[in-house]
Image (spheres, rainbow, N blue to C red):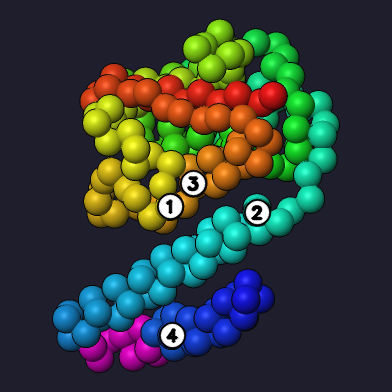
């Protein structure tokens, strides 16, 4: 099924996007403003659907992927991801070791950090902190940011696939990233949860038994 979705849906999608681009390149000067706008929207929608297919395939594969148990330095993962974002202020220990599947845990941290980068506040420089803390659920790792945050009454939507708290025109996305985080942590036998306030940042916690 996964292969069929990947192959059979991508082929016509590539044709739609490719032919639309060709029309713009070869006949763009002869199109009126409305026709050109429709083609550009068609390309944009096709690219978004392609990204959604990729994310859905990743989500499906996470349920079957064999798991390893390795030592993973989560602080190093964050530093690598922020190497292209020198404006971000990072608070992290020199080393933050976790045990689990290296590829999966890297995806967890990447998705949470990408979330912070996407929902940063335009009013202040972005700060991201990563570490560990004692919680009611036991020792947990956390990733905290000072971004736009969210209203806690919507917390039940945070990790659900396709659920988004913002319009796509404001913050583009597919709504799969944090669902992947939840699936990975639960496959490790852990828990994941989040806290936030509007314009007060967000904090994501996860445990790894």
Which residue matches tag 3? 179
Could you tell me residue 151's position as x and y percent? 24, 29
Q: Earlier in the sequence, mark 3 or mark 4?
A: 4
Secondary structure type for disc 4: helix
Q: Is residue 192 left or right of residue 152?
A: right
Residue pictured at 24% horizontal, 51% vertical = 167
Local packing at callout 2 (Cα closer than 10 Å; few below 14, some 14-19, many 20+) is few
Which residue matches tag 1? 161
Of badges 4 and 2, the one in the foreground is 2
Q: Are marks 3 and 1 in contact (CB under 8 Å)?
A: yes
Foreground pick, 8 / 80: 8
Could you tell me residue 59's position as x and y percent? 57, 56
Q: Is residue 80 visible?
A: no
Q: CA distance from mark 3 to mark 2?
A: 12 Å
> In the rendered structure, which segment of residues is drawn in magenta?
22-31
Q: Are marks 3 and 4 in contact (CB under 8 Å)?
A: no
Q: Earlier in the sequence, mark 4 or mark 2?
A: 4
Instruction: Say above or below: 206 vs 132.
Output: below
Displayed quadrant of residue 155: top left
Of badges 3 and 2, the one in the foreground is 2
Which residue matches tag 2? 63
Q: CA distance from mark 4 to mark 2?
A: 31 Å
Say the numbered circle drawn on residue 16.
4
Q: Is residue 202 visible?
A: yes
Could you tell me residue 137's position as x and y percent? 54, 17
Q: CA distance from mark 3 to mark 1?
A: 5 Å
Residue pictured at 21% horizontal, 85% vertical = 35
Foreground pick, 8 / 88: 8
């Amino acid at each position: 099924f996964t292969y069929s979705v990947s192959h059979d849906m991508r082929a016509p999608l590539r044709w739609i996007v490719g032919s639309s681009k060709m029309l713009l390149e070869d006949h763009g000067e002869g199109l009126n403003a409305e026709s050109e706008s429709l083609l550009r929207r068609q390309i944009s929608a096709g690219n978004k659907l392609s990204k959604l297919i990729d994310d859905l395939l990743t989500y499906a594969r996470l349920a079957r992927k064999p798991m390893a148990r390795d030592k993973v330095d989560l602080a190093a993962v964050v530093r690598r991801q922020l190497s292209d974002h020198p404006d971000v202020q990072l608070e992290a220990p020199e080393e933050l070791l976790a045990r689990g599947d290296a590829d999966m845990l890297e995806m967890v941290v990447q998705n949470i950090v990408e979330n912070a980068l996407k929902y940063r506040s335009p009013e202040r420089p972005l700060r991201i902190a990563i570490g560990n803390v004692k919680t009611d659920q036991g020792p947990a790792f956390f990733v905290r940011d000072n971004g736009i945050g969210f209203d806690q009454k919507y917390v039940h939507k945070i990790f659900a696939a396709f659920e988004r708290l913002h319009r796509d025109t404001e913050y583009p996305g597919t709504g799969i990233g944090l669902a992947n985080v939840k699936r990975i942590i639960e496959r490790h036998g852990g828990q994941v949860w989040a806290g936030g306030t509007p314009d007060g940042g967000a904090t994501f916690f996860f445990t790894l038994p």
